Amino acid sequence: MEPDIRSKALGVDPGSVRIGLALSDDIGFMAHPLQTLKTGKESPAEIAAIAAEKQSRVIVIGLPRNMNGTYGPAAEKSRELAAILTTMTQAKVVLWDERLTTAMATKQLHAAGRNSKEQRQLIDRAAAVQILQDWLDANPAL
């Protein structure tokens, strides 16, 4: 059964050190920053538990692509995370192109007067917001 995309969704920006999380509102319209996790073996279980706690029916994981459209090692880690999460949750797991999301998040924080070097966790959450919001915008209610 396909989930109703206009329900709560969890956005995930996986990284080698931290994982940024974002959550949509109850109707799946707007993405909001949620929290940052440390990357590790327990990360998939933590993400699955948060998705269940927040009643997310969709988990949107950022899939990094190079600017030429190819995939690198980071994309493989995103795919592995997606495969593991698929076995741990009933939520639909979706991979979403995340090119330039961290750069856009950093630019937005600078525009808001934030120092990005001191706000790495904030950048990770903002990148997760960008990933999730892009997915929400590209998937309007039918």
Image (cartoon, rainbow, N blue to C red):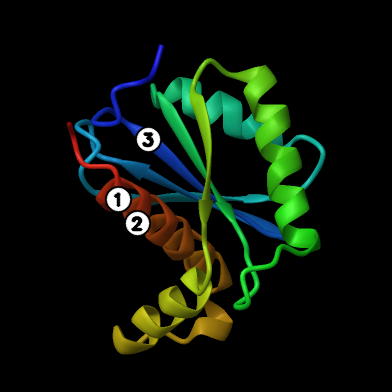
Q: Which numbered tag is attached to residue 134? A: 2
Task: Point out the frontmost of discs 1 and 2.
Answer: 1
Q: Is residue 45 visible to the viewer in this orientation of the structure?
A: no
Q: Which residue is drawn at 77% across and 64% down?
A: 72
How many discs mark residues in the rendered view?
3
Spatial CA distance of label 3 from label 2 is: 12 Å
Q: Which residue is drawn at 37% across and 35% down?
A: 9
Name the outermost residue toward the top.
Answer: 1
Q: Is residue 86 above or below residue 95?
A: above
Q: Is residue 9 above or below residue 20?
A: above
Q: Residue 19 placed where, x, y %? A: 62, 53
Element assignment for label 3: strand
What amino acid type should be assigned to the residue bearing mark 2? Asp
The residue tagged 1 is 138
The residue tagged 3 is 9
Q: Which residue is drawn at 39% across and 21% down?
A: 55
Question: Is there CB contact under 8 Å for labels 3 and 1?
Answer: no
Spatial CA distance of label 3 from label 1 is: 14 Å
Question: Is there CB contact under 8 Å for labels 1 and 2?
Answer: yes
What amino acid type should be assigned to the residue bearing mark 1? Ala
